[in-house]
Amino acid sequence: MEQLTLVGENRQGQFSRDGKEIIFQSARRPEQLNAQIYILHLDGMKEKRITFNDGEDSWPQFSPDGKRIVYASTTDELKEHPDSPAPSPAPSTTPASTLYEYWGGKLPDEEIYESDADGSHITRLTQSVGFDGEPDFSPDGFRILFTTTRAGQPQIFVMNNSGAGQRKWKTGDGDGFQGVYSPDGKWVAWVGDVADGKGTQIFVSSRYGGQVRRLTREPSVHLTPSWSPDDRVILFSGDVATPSQSKIYAVDVDGSCVRQLTSGKGNDRDPRFSPDGKMILFASDRSGSNQLYLENFIDSGPCLKAPTAASTSKL
């Protein structure tokens, strides 16, 4: 295991397609307290700050061609709605409660932006009061999935990369968040709830919606899904085997096996595969503050329970 960052609080890391850079959120640095976007050049381990906004920036991602980035920020919401009350906590029986916990107890009022990879030429893509965040590019770069609370509960929307055509992405009758495209562009994984109200689960369906597969079964928290480059495995964070402590897990896309990948003290979150599928990037507070780590991906660990086939559900 290799620790990549040392200064500040660092989370939500994502690789560039060529694997040479990592883009991430960084807060509580000597030069800035609010969260901004940085890029780490792995050759030489040099960091570069690329956003200089008044608000909090989050959830950055490179476009597939590496020329653009997408991220969310509270900058304009702070200026346009300075007296906006803090969102009320979500009821504990809803999937929103888990999403609120991920964001520190309340969802930030933020919008989604696109810019050049160096942070210049910023374009605002959303114009909705409340939470518009967690953007994810499609593999061809033409579409962006994102989470929004514009209709109340968190839902997954999709839009063109210009911000046009914003509409709800079909996840059955339920709500969801943290939607991510598979590398081949045919599937979407996301976090949603189930009828028994026990935790949040990982689901997969066609990028067009339709029939839904539930991959996880434990009555616990499952968050931040991320696909392997070959579309066979999905990483996620959660407290499946370690109550009240988040670790990184992998689930086969047929739901047949869940394996625990990280252990030890602290909370591990925000897993992402390297482009070659050999490493996983994640954030952990095991050192006392949130930092980014790299670890070899070992796909031969035991299943946590006897394998069971993924269920089909309409949510």
Image: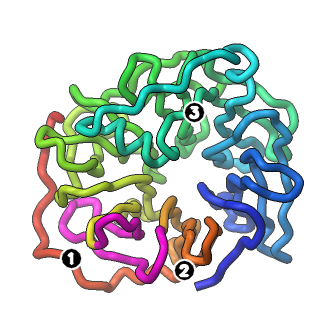
| Distance from the alpha carbon under mark 1 to that under mark 3 | 35 Å
Q: Which quadrant would residue 237 be assigned to in this image?
A: bottom left
Q: Position of residue 195 (x, y in %)?
A: 13, 38
Question: Which label is found at residue 304?
Answer: 1
Q: Which quadrant would residue 167 be assigned to in this image?
A: top left
Is residue 103 in view? yes
Q: Is residue 166 magenta?
A: no
Which amino acid lies under the numbered mark 2 shown in the image of this protein?
Glu
Q: Nearer the viewer, residue 265 or 138?
A: 265
Q: Position of residue 139 (x, y in %)?
A: 54, 45
State the quadrant of the N terminus: bottom right
Q: Nearer the viewer, residue 307 or 139?
A: 307
Q: Which quadrant would residue 230 be assigned to in this image?
A: bottom left
Q: Residue at x 29, y 47 (%)?
A: 204
Marked residue nearer the N-terminal end (2 or 3): 3
| Distance from the alpha carbon under mark 2 to that under mark 3 | 31 Å
Crowding at label 3, few (<14), some or many (≥20) Cα neighbours within 10 Å? many
Can you identify the residue that label 3 sits on? 108
Q: Which residues are magenta?
A: 242-267
Q: Is residue 254 magenta?
A: yes
Crowding at label 2, few (<14), some or many (≥20) Cα neighbours within 10 Å? some
> Quick one: SS at disc 3?
loop
Q: Residue at x 51, y 18 (%)?
A: 166
Q: Is residue 163 above or below residue 314?
A: above
Viewer-nearest of labels 1 and 3? 3
Which amino acid lies under the numbered mark 1 shown in the image of this protein?
Leu
Viewer-nearest of labels 2 and 3? 3
Can you identify the residue that label 2 sits on? 295
